[in-house]
Amino acid sequence: MPLERRSGTFSPPTLQTLPAAVTANVAELRARTRSTIMAVVKADGFGHGAVTVARAAVAAGAGWLGTTSLADASALRAAGLAVPILTWLHPSGIDAEAAAATGVDVAVGSVDELGALVAQAVSTVRIHLHMDTGMSRGGCPRDRWDELIRLARHAQQARKVRVVGVMGHLPLADRADPAANAPAVARMRRARQAVRAAGLGSPLVHLAATSGTLTDPATHFSMVRVGAGLVGIDPSETVELHGASRLTAPIVHTAAVPAGTAVGYGGAYVTDRATHLSVLPVGYADGIPRECSPQAGVEIGGRRFPVAGRVSMDQIVIDTGADRFRIGTSATVFGPAGGATPTIRDWARWAGTIPHTIVTGIGPRVKRSIA
Ligand SMILES: *Cc1c(COP(=O)(O)O)cnc(C)c1O
């Protein structure tokens, strides 16, 4: 078999989303809670395509959607998704009229933020009071909850807002230890009580994300906000979920080299035998972690082969040993668990990070497709 370049074309690097995996993951989550599921599709659905993930999740029974910005929420509306949507980060502030017009709920995490919203609101905006339940990363600090609730009551009486929900967040849920969540659960109950006592009715209460949903029913309240779990990531590593994406890349160059050949920048890898090298056109600009352990590898033809030498900006080299592959042969960088294919958890381990950073880091040059 000749190793030289073959004329013709082949599939470019592609990140394929697997909606059936999202469906299966929502079923796994629903089996563990009776609470409403909010499908969190921030960061473009954890890199899997927000609309694709949202559609699959809603079809599988998620009743709400969550995003960080109103712009992301509007894109979901434009795609025809009609379920309630909550946004909570507001990277360019809250546009009260845009929120009301798109029918998108906004989380309000401080007295100042609510004051600014009330000042601009013409129509009634649906809000969720975002309480800091122990994360110290957004949300109203506990010593100002009463003030926030009082202001919310006045704003609701003036029909500027409708308090639809009360939210918190769990800082330690990935420990899969209910005792670690107990302080936040107690704070969430206190917030719920204060909101009811203020005459704001019984809004939705939501605290848990994926880990809490999978490991601690006491955190579920009326709704859970699940992001990572939709795409197969369980931060608590207690449940085997279904990987929802596959990254493939074609072999674009091959070479047969003798023992003692230095590969890539710095010659960091030296072949210890005569071997074959295959080049894949994906590098750190495409989200392949530059810092990773020598265990890192990819699947080609049903077998695992190691990445040889440094990850370049646009390419990696694979040591395929005695195997010679044709130009255009597809390699799987990661995919759902099974066989020789690495998972996103493998890549996270090799890179000393979490799987979230692998899937959200895939760059824009990589083509997207849906299975
Ligand atoms: C990302 C996020 C979630 C979802 O968390 P996962 O662990 O990905 O399920 C829930 N709530 C808030 C506020 C978030 O930012």
Image: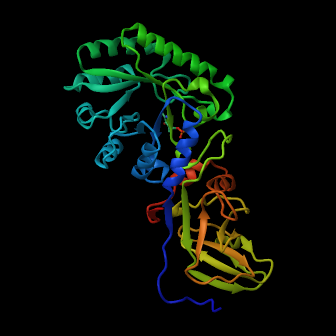
Residue 133 in the image: above or below residue 227: above
Residue 113 in the image: above or below residue 243: above
Q: For the point 70% across and 63% down, which residue is it?
A: 339
Image quadrant holding the N terminus, namely bottom right
Is 264 on the left or on the right of 57, as rendered? right
Q: For the point 47% across and 15% down, which residue is it?
A: 192
Protein image colouring: rainbow
Residue 271 in the image: above or below residue 172: below
Residue 45 in the image: above or below residue 285: above
Is 347 on the left or on the right of 125, as rendered? right
Quick one: 1 or 63, which is closer to the camera? 63
Residue reaching furthest to the top? 197
Is 368 on the left or on the right of 228, as rendered? left
Quick one: 283 or 225, which is closer to the camera? 225
Q: For the point 47% across and 82% down, which residue is it?
A: 9
- Residue 228 visible? The answer is no
Quick one: 155 or 136, which is closer to the camera? 155
Residue reaching furthest to the right? 272
- Residue 190 visible? The answer is yes
x then y, percent, for residue 325: 64, 82
x then y, percent, for residue 62: 45, 39
Task: Report how many numbered discs are placed on residues in the image.
Answer: 0
Q: Quadrant of residue 163?
A: top left
x then y, percent, for residue 247: 55, 63
Quick one: 45 or 60, which is closer to the camera? 60
x then y, percent, for residue 366: 47, 65
